[in-house]
Amino acid sequence: MTHTADSSRRGWSWDRVLLLVLALLACGLALASPQLIVPYPQAMAWFESAAFFPLLALTLMALAGVVEVFNRRHAIELKDSEELDSSQACMGLAWAMLGLFGLYMLAVPWLGYLSSTLLFLVASSRLLGFAWRTTWALSLPLALVMWWVFLKLLKVHFGHGWLI
């Protein structure tokens, strides 16, 4: 069975057109980031700027969209597809992880980056069914490395929580 989406006049499928539009939108937002982030400190080093992560994410989205448009120029055989089988998805678990991430975003300014990241990683690992030993073996080093990279190396400001 071959997956061929409805084609437009030039032979472009709807998914390729959508990907290209999203890539162009991400590119436009990346270019507009200095005007969208107020105040935008011009004198600050580029990797310490508040615009660094939005620019990085939007640039990666734009590049990934263009690469995927290029990769989808041929129809794919569904049996050979590397895509995940959505019938195996556990939507309750996905919604729970999304909820945990929302709580994590709310917790960072109040608790602090390190403590909220550690709590999020421990809670999500347990939700995913990891053993306690595996949970701590993954969560603690990852939280410490992320804290060091973002707060010490890149000097990203997350606000001052009442914990670390």
Image (cartoon, rainbow, N blue to C red):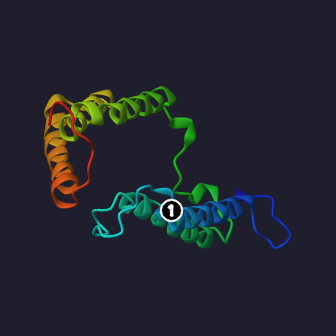
In front here: 76 or 67?
Answer: 67
Residue 117 picture quarter: top left
Residue 48 picture quarter: bottom left
Residue at point 20%, 36% (across, down): 118
Residue at point 68%, 59% (across, down): 18
Horizontal and vertical percent position of residue 87? 57, 36
Q: Is residue 61 visible?
A: no
Residue 46 picture quarter: bottom left
Tell whether 114 sits left or right of 40: left
Query: Count of labels shown?
Result: 1
Mark 1 lies on a secondary structure that is helix
Q: Residues within 10 Å of mark 1 (few under 14, many from 20)?
A: few
Decide: is 96 above or below 54: above
Tell whether 80 sits left or right of 93: right
Decide: is 121 above or below 148: above
Tell whether 134 sits left or right of 104: left
Horizontal and vertical percent position of residue 7? 81, 64
Q: Amino acid type of disc 1?
A: Gln
Horizontal and vertical percent position of residue 123? 27, 29
Q: Which residue is mark 1?
A: 35
Residue at point 75%, 63% (across, down): 13
